[in-house]
Image (cartoon, rainbow, N blue to C red):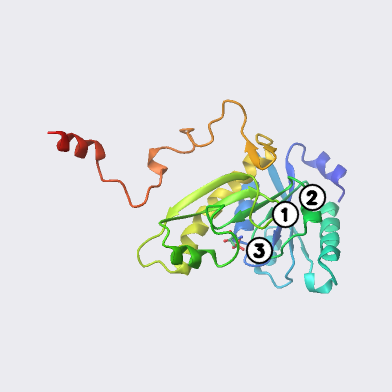
Amino acid sequence: MTAAGASEEAPGRKRVGVLISGRGSNMEALVRAAAAPDYPAEIVCVISNRPDAAGLRTAQAAGIATNALDHKAFATRPAFEEALTHALQDHGVELIALAGFMRLMTPAFVQRWHDQIINIHPSLLPAFKGLHVHQRMLDAGVMLAGCTVHVVRAAMDTGPIIAQGAVPVEAGDDAATLAARVLKVEHQLYPHALALYASGALRVEGDQIVWPQGADKVGDAATLDAATMLIAPPLPASPLEQRAQSAI
Ligand code: GRF
């Protein structure tokens, strides 16, 4: 399918290729969201560098074109990435969504797809880049964990931040329970962030996202109100009342 032919079929929706390496639950969340006809992106292919990735089967079951592109079959990273670019181009991909894709990308690949790659990372970046994030958060004693969707730059887990979600670390958490709580937010956040980015509402300027004039990225009552504000340890039940009492 050519890009030109495809855009005739679905004008206005960004053609997204999702790259995975494993389970693919974030990919599944994107596929589900993109099933809505008014979603500004469509998932046109799912590519895994691991042929045995469970997510490939999930994508096939959802009727999405899949490719298994085993990185081990390529002598060099650039050779793998060249094949990857060809596969993405074959599907007319305009935007790449990394969803648990466990390969570092060369600066050349990131430059080739400049501002066209987004990623989800299970921490409130720029804190806790890299691997084993949940255990490292627990070891550091943080109280708020979360996840970030960002535009990809050459350095690992860096780039303009599109959206973030926070959850509390709870007493007795281990890496698995914390990861599960963060993952629930990831499944909400990624479709939301992809929609924002694919709709063209946001601009990237250098290392920052520029929001449209008049948009209030955190204060908009439609997306964040007092009930969803997350503060840990929690505020006293009724701070106003307590303040009034202490004034007497
Ligand atoms: C997610 O936690 C994501 O944030 C990270 O890798 C994990 C992938 O999980 N980059 P899944 O394959 O989407 O289920």
Q: Earlier in the sequence, mark 2 or mark 1?
A: 2
Q: Residue furthest left?
A: 248
Please rate how many residues cluster around mark 3, counting C-alpha atoms within 10 Å: few if below 14, some from 14 to 19, many from 20. some
Quadrant assignment for ligand 1: bottom right
Q: Position of residue 180 (x, y in %)?
A: 48, 63
Residue occupying image coordinates x 82% and y 65%: 80
Whole-angstrom CA distance, mark 2 to mark 3, is 30 Å
The earlier-in-sequence mark between 2 and 3 is 3
Residue 78 in picture, x, y percent from top left? 84, 63
- From mark 2 to mark 1, how far is it between C-alphas? 8 Å
Residue found 65% across the figure and 67% down from its top:
22
Q: Residue at x 40, y 47 (%)?
A: 230
Residue toward you, 56 or 205: 205
Q: Which residue is mark 2?
A: 111
Residue carrying label 1 = 154
Mark sitting earlier along the chain (3/1): 3
Q: Give the quarter of the figure containing the C terminus.
A: top left
Q: Which mark is residue 58?
A: 3
Element marked by disc 1: loop
Q: Which circle, 2 or 3, is nearer the viewer?
A: 2
Position of residue 79 measured from the top left corner of the image (x, y, whole percent):
86, 65
Amino acid type of the residue that numbered disc 2 sits on in the rendered structure: Gln
Three-letter residue code for mark 1:
Ala
Q: Is residue 10 visible?
A: yes
Mark 2, other Cα within 10 Å: few <14 / some 14–19 / many ≥20: some
Left or right of 241, for residue 126: right
The image quadrant of residue 103 is bottom right
Q: Secondary structure at mark 3?
A: helix
The amino acid type found where label 3 is placed reads Thr
Q: How many marks?
A: 3
**What's the CA distance linking mark 3 and mark 1?**
29 Å
SS at mark 2 in the image: helix
